[in-house]
Image (cartoon, helix red, strand yellow):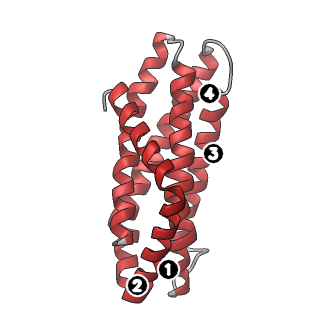
Amino acid sequence: MDPIQKLMDEHRVIETVLGALPAFSASLDEGQESSREDLAQIVTFIREYADAYHHGKEEDMLFTAMVKAGMPQDGGPIAVMLADHEQGRRYVAVMGQVAAGEGPLTESEISEARLAAAGYADLLGAHIMKEDQVLYPMAQRLLKPEQMESMAAQFVKYEAKKGAAAENLASMATRLAARFGS
């Protein structure tokens, strides 16, 4: 397994949900009863797949390997990626608060959900591009073959624990994309 390719493949899954966010936001005007439930599914996907599963691999395995190979953690590309992850979590927290409410969405909640969804989609779209085009190629140049093999082994162990859940979440991404026409 090529761990960098695996992370890039996960980006494609994440992008399916990012592509659904504009149509989801537009659907909020229709006052659908399912809006909170739809938002809760989006939040679940982001928290469990994009953040815990994907960003977890990056933060705990890739970034750690890159720091051990000499890249600074507190400055440069890794610091930027970590800051993006934290900003994304703030957007998702807002969406999560709205999803946790009861009854039809209020105008204020619609506005909050829209702003957070748009902010998250813009942030993560740019973040993915920076990783695919800058950070991952840097990692491929910086890390020695044995470091990549070690990271691949870590990924296999991690995925053995999380595999079924990740597959279910990837299926959720497909359903969300189909529901919101992305």
Report helix, strand or loop for mark 1: helix
Name the N-terminal-most of marks 4 and 1.
1
* Tag shown at residue 99: 4
Q: Amino acid at mark 3?
A: Arg
Up the image or down, 69 lies above or below 154; here it is below
Q: Between residues 29 and 36, which one lies in front from this camera angle?
A: 36
Residue 77 visible in rendering: no
In this picture, residue 147 sits left or right of residue 111: left
Report helix, strand or loop for mark 4: helix
Q: Nearer the viewer, mark 4 or mark 2?
A: 4
Read off the residue under disc 1. 66
* Tag shown at residue 142: 2
Give how far across and how far down residue 172 sits, in percent: 43, 37
Crowding at dot 1, Cα within 10 Å, few <14 / some 14-19 / many 20+, comes out as: many
Q: Label 2 near label 1: C-beta < 8 Å?
A: yes
Q: Would you identify the image quadrant in which residue 79 lies?
A: bottom right
Give how far across and how far down residue 93 sits, in percent: 64, 40
Q: Between residues 171 and 180, which one lies in front from this camera angle?
A: 171
Compute the Cα span from label 3 to label 1: 26 Å
Residue drawn at x 63%, y 14% is 106
Residue 12 visible in rendering: yes
Q: Amino acid at mark 1?
A: Met
Compute the Cα span from label 4 to label 3: 14 Å
Report helix, strand or loop for mark 2: helix
Read off the residue under disc 3. 90
Please identify the quadrant where the C terminus is shown. Answer: top left
Compute the Cα span from label 4 to label 2: 42 Å
Please identify the quadrant where the N terminus is shown. Answer: bottom left
